[in-house]
Image: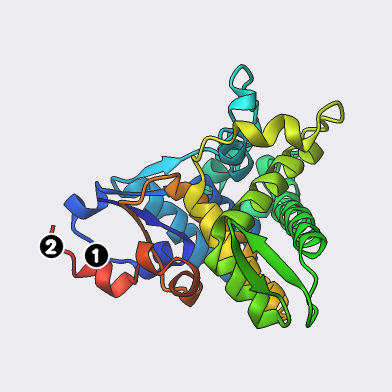
Amino acid sequence: MKYYLETNAIYGLAKVPESLLKSSYTSVLTLLELLSGMEAESYATRKAAVKKIFDWPILVDWAMPEEIIFEAFDFFDDDGFGDRRTGYLVELIQELRSSSTYQEYIASYAYNSEYGHLFFKGIDNGSNIAFSIQMELYMLAVHASFKIDEHEIFTVDNKTYLINSPKALKDCLKSEPQLSHGMLINANANMLIELLKLNEYKTDDISPSYNGHIDIYIMAVSRYTIKKICESQTANKNDIFDLLHILYLRDQPHRKIISADKFYKTYLSDQVLSIEDFKRIEP
């Protein structure tokens, strides 16, 4: 069993047996969250959390979320993602760890450079934009495929569904997850086309090469979007990062997210452990 420590688990864990930590890992996304949201009042807490990551015997998955999605399409097998952001983030981490005060940290070259704090603050905002594009494409696909009407009949594999209410649409999508999954795979392919400016390619060039490496993420995002669409709910501020952390499970069902966030209980209940339950695991 492998345990993924998302950001609030890093905050919430103090004394953990070393043998358990050796089966645990976190990600560059956790580090990015810790640094991009740092202000004077959170400096000490966030610096301590970053220190834990490097003091503990845990691994860091250094792939950015976009790279994990990129690797889920065999279309790109002959190409590398070519992401230099990790190197810049490491420089900022080193500056943070060597600083004694917030004032010293924000006066440093690494903090103020072109690829310093504001750069990573922009990535934080950019992730929200990229995710919004993905969700917008998905929602457009849902609305193009389904119309809520008292006479609307939808047929899948000789099964018929009357789509006469948001609940009926939700029940249909839950009963036929391949519909939602297919639309989300297309949305991710479209996001990569936008992100990498691959204007010469179309969704149908990329989507068929999906290899299943982010199936757990696709499943969770499907549950999330179905609930939001069918219950007319808006996204919460931190939803994007909560969902992106799921990418770090890859396609490994034996991995668990350690988190105090109720979000995962809602959308990934079979692969989440609370911090308290994690602490109780026998080493």
Report x, y in % for residue 66: 64, 41
Amino acid on which disc 1 is placed: Lys
Q: Which mark is residue 282?
A: 2
Q: Which residue in the protein does label 1 denote?
A: 15
Q: Is residue 253 visible?
A: yes
Report x, y in % for residue 59: 36, 42
> Residue sitting at 74 percent across and 44 percent down?
191
Question: Total label count?
Answer: 2
User: Mark 2 against mark 1, which lies toward the viewer?
Assistant: 2
Task: Determine the secondary structure under disc 2.
Answer: loop
Q: Is residue 1 left or right of residue 105?
A: left
Residue count near mark 1 (Cα–Cα under 10 Å), binned few <14, some 14–19, many ≥20: few
> Residue sitting at 65 percent across and 56 percent down?
36
Q: Is residue 35 visible?
A: no
> Above or below — where is 51 with respect to 61?
below
Q: Which mark is residue 208?
A: none
Q: Is residue 202 left or right of residue 78?
A: right
Q: Is residue 50 left or right of residue 136?
A: left
Outermost residue toward the left in this view:
282
Residue closest to the eye, 209 or 239: 209
Report x, y in % for residue 61: 45, 41
Tell me the quarter of the image containing the C terminus: bottom left
Report x, y in % for residue 111: 68, 46
> Residue sitting at 19 percent across and 70 percent down?
280
Q: Earlier in the sequence, mark 2 or mark 1?
A: 1
Outermost residue toward the right in this view:
199
Amino acid on which disc 2 is placed: Glu
Task: Determine the secondary structure under disc 1.
Answer: loop
Residue count near mark 2 (Cα–Cα under 10 Å), binned few <14, some 14–19, many ≥20: few
> Above or below — where is 256 with respect to 72?
below
The image's colour scheme reads rainbow
Residue closest to the eye, 178 or 114: 178
